[in-house]
Image (tube, helix red, strand yellow):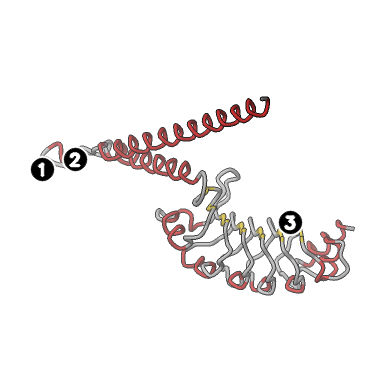
């Protein structure tokens, strides 16, 4: 039966009641809590809004470009829209319960396109780029993408698989510093291969300096080492406490 539902979606490209009932096994649309509609050739969300109790929805790898019909899904907490043809996120701003949103592999081109999501107070995880599977969005190519996203979504806990808040976030931030410093050094080194102009300024004026990048790398390395040492100390202390408790229980 699930296969028949898939054929219906592929043939017409539109979500129907028959498809929803077939894929979920539920007779009443309002009883559906979880739906997997991955790779069914869907381009029209049809009657999806009638699934009023829906909490988890997977629409990955379809042909979706408009999201306005999702607006009625007030209980939705997890939404996977990866690998579609989405440019505008209009409609998602009504999903007040949304906590996890996957948008990798779409056509979102600017930070402004994401502003409609800023009112989603429960949003914890947002993914626009997946380097592992080589899926992204044009907006991710922006040099200030990460900084702008953190500024726009101060309560976000995870961005593109990177932890921003809570335990472990310091390691991600240090790695980001190191990565940025390495990129700056590479740019600086590439400049050293450019032809030098005529000598109307001192020779050393055109020589790229790596002192700033080296300083950042050194500081980041020290911070990372201190963090790792702190973790090691915590682990050792925990082991000592555990051993003490074991000895105490024996006696």
Quadrant position of the C terminus in the picture: top right
Point out residue 166 in the picture as x, y percentages from the top left corner: 51, 49
Could you tell whether 109 is left or right of 219 in the image? right
Query: Which mark is in front, 3 or 2?
Result: 3
Distance from Cα at disc 3 to Cα at disc 2: 55 Å
- Residue that mark 3 sits on: 38
- Residue that mark 2 sits on: 206
As rendered, which of 118 and 195 lies closer to the eye?
118
Q: Is residue 163 above or below residue 238?
A: below
Point out residue 176 in the picture as x, y percentages from the top left corner: 43, 44
Q: Quadrant of residue 21?
A: bottom right
Q: Residue at x 48, y 61 (%)?
A: 153
Characterize the local packing of mark 3: few (<14), some (14-19) or many (20 or more) Cα atoms within 10 angstroms: some
Query: Which mark is in front, 3 or 1?
Result: 3
* Disc 1 secondary structure class: loop
Q: Residue at x 32, y 40 (%)?
A: 216
Point out residue 152 in the picture as x, y percentages from the top left corner: 45, 63
Q: Is tag 3's residue or tag 1's residue first in the polypeptide sequence?
A: 3
Q: Quadrant of residue 222?
A: top left
Point out residue 165 in the picture as x, y percentages from the top left corner: 50, 52
Q: Is tag 3's residue or tag 2's residue first in the polypeptide sequence?
A: 3
- Residue that mark 1 sits on: 201
Distance from Cα at disc 2 to Cα at disc 1: 8 Å
Q: Residue at x 13, y 41 (%)?
A: 198
Q: Residue at x 47, y 67 (%)?
A: 112
Could you tell whether 62 is left or right of 102 in the image? right
Q: Residue furthest front?
A: 251
As rendered, which of 66 and 12 lies closer to the eye?
66
* Disc 3 secondary structure class: loop
Q: Quadrant of residue 189?
A: top left
Quadrant position of the N terminus in the picture: bottom right
Residues at discs 3 and 2 in contact (Cβ within 8 Å): no
């Amino acid at each position: 039966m699930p296969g028949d539902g898939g054929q219906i979606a592929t043939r017409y490209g539109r979500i129907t009641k028959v498809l929803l009932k077939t894929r979920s096994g539920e007779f009443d649309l309002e009883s559906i809590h979880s739906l997997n509609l991955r790779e069914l050739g869907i381009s029209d969300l049809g009657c999806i809004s009638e699934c009023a109790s829906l909490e988890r929805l997977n629409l990955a790898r379809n042909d979706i470009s408009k999201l306005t019909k999702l607006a009625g899904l007030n209980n939705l907490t997890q939404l996977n829209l990866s690998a579609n043809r989405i440019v505008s996120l209009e409609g998602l701003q009504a999903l007040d319960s949304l906590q996890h949103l996957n948008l990798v592999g779409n056509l979102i081109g600017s930070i402004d396109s994401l502003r409609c999501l800023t009112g989603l107070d429960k949003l914890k995880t947002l993914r626009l780029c997946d380097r592992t599977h080589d899926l992204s969005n044009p907006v991710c190519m922006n040099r200030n993408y990460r900084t702008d996203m953190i500024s726009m979504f101060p309560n976000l806990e995870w961005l593109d698989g990177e932890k921003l808040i809570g335990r472990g976030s310091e390691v991600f931030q240090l790695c980001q510093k190191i990565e940025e410093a390495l990129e700056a050094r590479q740019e600086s080194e590439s400049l050293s291969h450019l032809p030098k102009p005529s000598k109307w300024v001192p020779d050393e004026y055109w020589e790229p300096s790596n002192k700033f990048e080296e300083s950042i790398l050194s500081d980041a390395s020290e911070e990372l080492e201190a963090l790792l040492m702190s973790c090691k100390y915590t682990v050792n202390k925990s082991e000592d406490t555990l051993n003490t408790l074991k000895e105490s229980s024996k006696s």
